[in-house]
Amino acid sequence: MSAENPSSNDPLEIRLSLDDLIAAYRVHARASLLRSLAIVTAAVTVGGLWSVSKSLSVMTIANVFVVLALILAFGIGIGILSQRFAIPFRARRIYRQQKNLQRPYQLSWDDANVRTASAEGSAATPWNDFLKWREGKDTFLLYRSDMLFQMFPKRAFHDQTQIDEFRRLAQQHISARAGRKRQD
């Protein structure tokens, strides 16, 4: 097949950048942040309903809502600061420490496996071995556990058709087994 029209079986050449790592960490953290905000919002709602149900004075109810709103705002602020500052700081540190992130590797896949190869070795991982997957604007994450993932930047794919095929296989083999859609 020509270089201008590579097949989906042709390995993709990937060299992760610091920006790729930051994007992956942001996709990973977003799910945790959304869960945390949902919990805080639920707590604010329950607290507000509790204060109303106790037939407290209007001033006391207003004070409770103000405190709960401040807690929610604080949670949102921490999440924003984490996305903006903490994640890039941690990613820079990890990118410097973990030398394999800086080395090139190849990615290929088929209906059965996701294959990676580098100068250090190669692996063929069955799609069903992945626990879950997430997709961000710039990256795919395939999880081996709740905290361990492999990242594949979309910029490495040859075209939208390959991205769509990769997504379809993740949905087919990972989401169906996990029982819910795993796309962020």
Image (cartoon, rainbow, N blue to C red):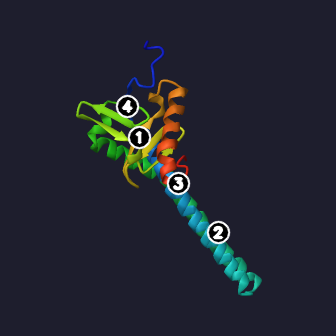
Residue 35: % across, % down: 54, 60
Question: Label 4 vs label 1: CA separation?
Answer: 10 Å
| Quadrant housing residue 156 | top left
Q: Are marks 4 and 1 in contact (CB under 8 Å)?
A: no
Q: Earlier in the sequence, mark 4 or mark 3?
A: 4
SS class, disc 2: helix
Q: Looking at the picture, which amino acid does disc 3 mark?
A: Gly
Q: Which mark is residue 179?
A: 3
Q: Residue at x 73, y 81 (%)?
A: 52
Residue carrying label 1: 151
Residue carrying label 4: 107
Residue 27: % across, % down: 49, 47
SS class, disc 4: strand
Q: Quadrant of the N terminus?
A: top left
Indicate which label's residue lies in the foreground, 4 or 2.
4
Q: Earlier in the sequence, mark 4 or mark 1?
A: 4
Indicate which label's residue lies in the foreground, 2 or 3.
3
Q: Which mark is residue 69?
A: 2
Q: Residue at x 62, y 69 (%)?
A: 42
